[in-house]
Image (cartoon, helix red, strand yellow):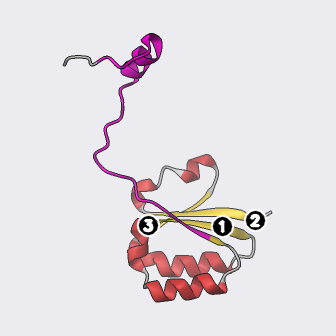
Amino acid sequence: MKRIVFITPRDAELGFGLAGVMQYVISAAETEDTLRKVMKETDIGIVVIDERLMEGIDERKMREMEDRWYGIFLILPAPEKGIEVEDYAVRLIKRAIGYHVRLGQ
């Protein structure tokens, strides 16, 4: 069975590795070398890379590497900044009474 590898920047270090998935945590400058290393491993079938790391590799080189590789290559969208996470208490109230209540602060 082929394995899945995630390649992420340092701010995502505590993500996929905790779930038991193989994860490389790198900087954008290390992207090309890491991809070449991973794509040489015969037991890897899917490579998922954070789109922020794609700045570290020339698009033409990336296409060439993809064309020569037998596996699937996916780009993971970068997480958005500034998204407010709904408070746990608000979610519970919403679920209990069936609609959203705005709590004053």
Q: What stretch is highlighted in magenta?
A: 73-101
- Identity of the amino acid at label 2? Lys
Mark 2 crowdedness (10 Å alpha carbons): few <14, some 14-19, many ≥20 = few
* Pointer 1 local density, CA inside 10 Å: few below 14, some 14–19, many at least 20: some
Whether residue 71 sits left or right of residue 9 in the image: it is right
Residue at disc 2, secondary structure: loop
Q: Which of marks 3 and 2 is in front?
A: 3
Q: Is residue 91 magenta?
A: yes
**Mark 2 in CB contact with mark 1 (< 8 angstroms):** yes
> Which residue in the protein does label 3 denote?
51
Residue 80 at x, y = what percent?
A: 35, 52
Q: In this view, does 98 lie above or below 66?
A: above
Question: What is the CA distance from the residue labelled 3 to the residue labelled 2?
Answer: 23 Å
Residue 80 among those drawn in magenta = yes
Q: Is mark 3 on a helix, strand or loop?
A: helix
Q: Residue 95 carries which label?
A: none
Residue bearing the label numbered 2: 2
Q: Earlier in the sequence, mark 3 or mark 2?
A: 2
Dot 1 falls on a residue whose secondary structure is strand
Residue under label 1, please give it: 46
Q: Where is residue 99 in the image (x, y as percent from the top left)?
A: 39, 17
Query: Residue at the location (40% across, 78% down)?
Result: 56
